[in-house]
Structures are given as structure tokens and as C-alpha cells.
Amino acid sequence: MTGPALLNDCFLHDKDRLRHQEALDILKSRVSRVTETEIVRLEEAYGRIAAQPLKAPRNIPLADNSAVDGYAFRHADHEEAGGFFPLQNRVSAGHPSETALAPWAAMQIFTGAVMPEGADTVAMQEDCERHTQDGREFVIVPQGLKPGANCRKAGEDVSEGTEILSEKSWLRPQDLAGIASTGTAELSVFKKLRVALVSTGDELRRPGKLITVGDVYDSNHFLLRGLAQSLPVDIEDLGILKDDGDLVEAILRDAAERFDVILTTGGASRGEEDHVLAALDRLGQRHMWQLAIKPGRPMMFGQIGNCTLLGLPGNPVAAMVCFLLYARPVMSVLAGGPFLEPQRFQMPAGFDVPKKKPDRREFYRGFLKTEAGGTVTAHKFERDGSGLISGLRAADGLIEIPEETVSVRKGDTVTFLPFSGMGIL
Ligand SMILES: Nc1nc2c(c(=O)[nH]1)N[C@H]1C(S)=C(S)[C@@H](COP(=O)(O)OP(=O)(O)OC[C@H]3O[C@@H](n4cnc5c(N)ncnc54)[C@H](O)[C@@H]3O)O[C@H]1N2
Ligand code: MOO
């Protein structure tokens, strides 16, 4: 166990808690891929992680072709022909010319059609004039085109042998287009991570049920289900566990046999009704707990056999922040991908925080504003409560305030982590 000593967390000072960077170091040192590979058709590959590199087996495009609808000619002929070319034949996409371009002639050509042998330049249709003389067709091509104009060269997108996909790449729509352009129909990817979702707390009820005073709807289930879906996962809902130590332990023991990851929410701190921590300590090993961050202090990470347990705090804001900062990169690595660091941008603060506690890193819910001069500034959701889903909904991302900072003034440079850089559209 690498976590700090088991103190009663009410009396634990931030100085004694693990710093954000230390937490990341622990996570990085403790996790590696657990998934096997499988072959999937390209239609099924979106959002998966490539298990093998891929090289382009041929040039893309395969042959020189026209970028416009117009007239293909040999640039060196232009001056001698005075831009006046007899028309030889027409070539369209998918129907290459069987004959080479004759000297001082032009061919009508369409976008994507293969350049006829001997032609190197294409003039746009709307810049040219067509004439008929003695029953023959001619085209007048204006001066001023550079040699090779409007011609797309073979291999200009990707040349034969280039590695277009490396292992561990996430397959985005544009990657699938790139793979398809090589003619590849199937590829090797890592299998989906088997994830169990668990909510804990006697007060929780699922939407659709009536509630009375003291009850709370289980919003975290839906938050985490949505967040996890940005990763290649198969999710199983294990429902809401009552605050009963034996029950929590039995369910986690069973889940650890069947899943790669158990993602829990609630029961992570040290209260008498917080049973996840106690169950983890009885069943497996705790590698991390109690971070010097806000929100998300009771974030827990450990293992039960080969199953990774990510214990997120119950407060919704803390659950989301901890998922994005810790659970997401861990789950990516377990699934065969990279340790996903959030994107970070520096920008001026549009808010003041007169006093911030030292020794802990804080993450505010932030939204962006474009000021009159075009400068983008980061603004803090005005209320801090870790139970406020409204703040998460108003935000475009998180504002990260480092441990050593004790105040923020308008105009200070702050770090902004957009949600879009953490898998949330
Ligand atoms: N004595 C201490 N008390 C608390 C500490 C502490 O250090 N010492 N830490 C506080 C912090 S920070 C957080 S965050 C919370 C998290 O604790 P738990 O993970 O044990 O969460 P719960 O106590 O089960 O619930 C906290 C809060 O969140 C609501 N909740 C829980 N699950 C859900 C859900 N699925 N959907 C919606 N809301 C949920 C729950 O009703 C509580 O209101 O602990 C502080 N306490
Ligand atoms: O971390 Mo608790 O994270 O403040 O709500």
C-alpha cells in the first residue's frame, strides 16, 4: 500500500494528503493493459483502440488526378499553342483515358479523374472558352497557370509504406476515413473493458420512483454512465447498494471476479456509513486514498484480485472531477490506450478568489467568455458546493488552481481544462 497512513480524515491536513501529481504517479505506476485483442470490421471500430500499427499498402491517391472540373493540358505546350487547344476526348472520375494526351491538345476532365498520360496541368472550366470550328471542338485556356496547377499528385495524402496508425491510437471518425482510404476492411483492436457501475447509499433512489424527505435521486449513475461511454467499455449496472458493510463486501467480491473495473460512487470517505473503503481494505489492496484536492478529496483507487476499483466520492461534482482526472486515464490504460492527460490552456481569469487554502489543488467549474477585444477569459461558476449539478452544467470545463496559489485576481493567468479535451462533447 502506498497511500498515506490510515488517519481519521477529519483530522488529516492537506499537507498530509497526496498531491495531484503524486496521485497521477501512483496511478501510472500501478496500471497496465488488461484487455485482449479482437478483430472488428471498420463499421464497428469507432471509439476503439488500435492494437496493431497499420502501414499504407499503396499511395493515396493511387494516381495523379484532377482537383477541378476543367481541361487538362501539357503546360509546356501552352505558349506554342497560344492557349488554343483542340479537344481530344473527355475523362471522368472512375473512367481513365485509354489514350495519352496528343501534342498541343487538351482533354476535358472532371474532379477526381485520373490525369491522362502526358497532361500535367488543369485549367478550371469557368476560366476557359469552348469553340466549335469546322465541326471540331476547341478550348481556349488562359495564361498564368503554374505547371501542375489543379493537379493532385499520387501519394500526396499518404505515400506507400507510411505508418498511418500506431498501436494505442484512439479511432476517431477521421482515423476511420484514413484507414478506409487504404482499403482496410477489418482491424485488430483491444476488447472493450468490462465495467461495473455501483452507487452506494441508503438515501438513493432511481428516477421514476417516488421519493420522500431524506431520499436523493441517483444522479451519479447517469453522470458516470455517460462519462464512461467516451471510452471503449461494456457497462453493467449493479444498482444501488445499501449502507451495509457485509452487503457491499459481498457484491464487490463477486464483481471483482467478473469485471475489469468497478466504478463506485459514494461511501468513499471515513464515516461509519462509508463502506466501500472498508470493503476494499478487507478484500484487496488500497493504493491511493485522500488527495489534497478540492473537490474529490476521498478519491480511492485499489485492486481486488485483478480487478481495479475506482472509488469516486458521492458528491456529484467531486465524482465528475475525479472521473475526468483519474478514472478516465486509468480506464484508458487498462483498455490498451494511453494515460489520457486533459488538454490545458492558459488564459486570463475573469474572476477573483481573495483567499484560497494553500497546499491543495482546486478545480472550479469554469466557463469561457469572449471579451469585446476578442480575448477569451475563464470565469468561475459563482457557487462552490460539491453537490451542485447546475455548476457542472453551466461549465465548459475546469479551472485548475495549483497548490501554491493562495489568491486569484481578475487578469491573472489561469489554466483551463476544457471538457471537450476530456471526452465530453
Ligand atoms: N468527516 C468528514 N466528512 C466528509 C469528508 C471528510 O473528509 N470528513 N469529506 C467530504 C467530502 S470532500 C466529500 S466529496 C464527501 C464524499 O463522501 P462519500 O464518497 O463517502 O459520499 P457519501 O457520503 O456517500 O455522499 C456524499 C453526498 O453525495 C450524495 N450522493 C452520494 N451518491 C450519490 C449519487 N449516486 N447520486 C447523487 N448524489 C449522491 C449523498 O447523498 C451525499 O449528499 O464526504 C464529505 N464528508
Ligand atoms: O471533495 Mo468533496 O470533494 O469537497 O465534495
Image (cartoon, rainbow, N blue to C red):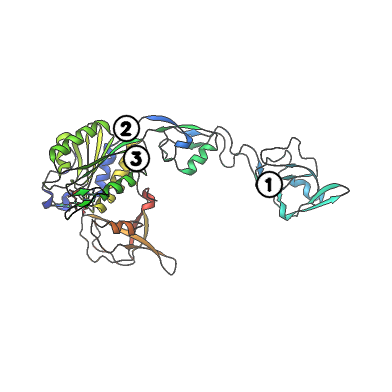
Residue 84 visible to the viewer: no
> Which is more N-terminal, label 2 or label 3?
2
What kind of residue is marked 1? Answer: Gly
User: Where is mark 3, residue-wise?
Assistant: 332
**Is label 1 or label 3 in front?**
3
- Proximity of marks 3 and 2: CB atoms separated by less than 8 Å: no
In this rendering, position of residue 265 left or right of residue 415:
left
- Give x and y (percent) for residue 188: 44, 31
10 Å crowding of disc 2: few (<14), some (14-19), many (20+)? some
Name the image quarter holding the N terminus: top left
User: How many numbered circles does the render carry?
Assistant: 3
- Indicate the secondary structure of the residue bearing disc 2: loop
What kind of residue is marked 2? Answer: Val
In the depicted view, which residue is nearer to us: 126 or 163? 126
User: Where is mark 2, residue-wise?
Assistant: 34
- Indicate the secondary structure of the residue bearing disc 3: helix
**Residue 91 position (above or below residue 256):** below
- Distance in Å between CA atoms under marks 3 and 2: 10 Å
In this rendering, position of residue 190 left or right of residue 285:
right
- Give x and y (percent) for residue 415: 33, 57
Residue 148 is tagged as 1
Is ligand 2 closer than 8 angstroms to the Cβ of mark 3?
no
10 Å crowding of disc 3: few (<14), some (14-19), many (20+)? many
- Distance in Å between CA atoms under marks 2 and 1: 51 Å
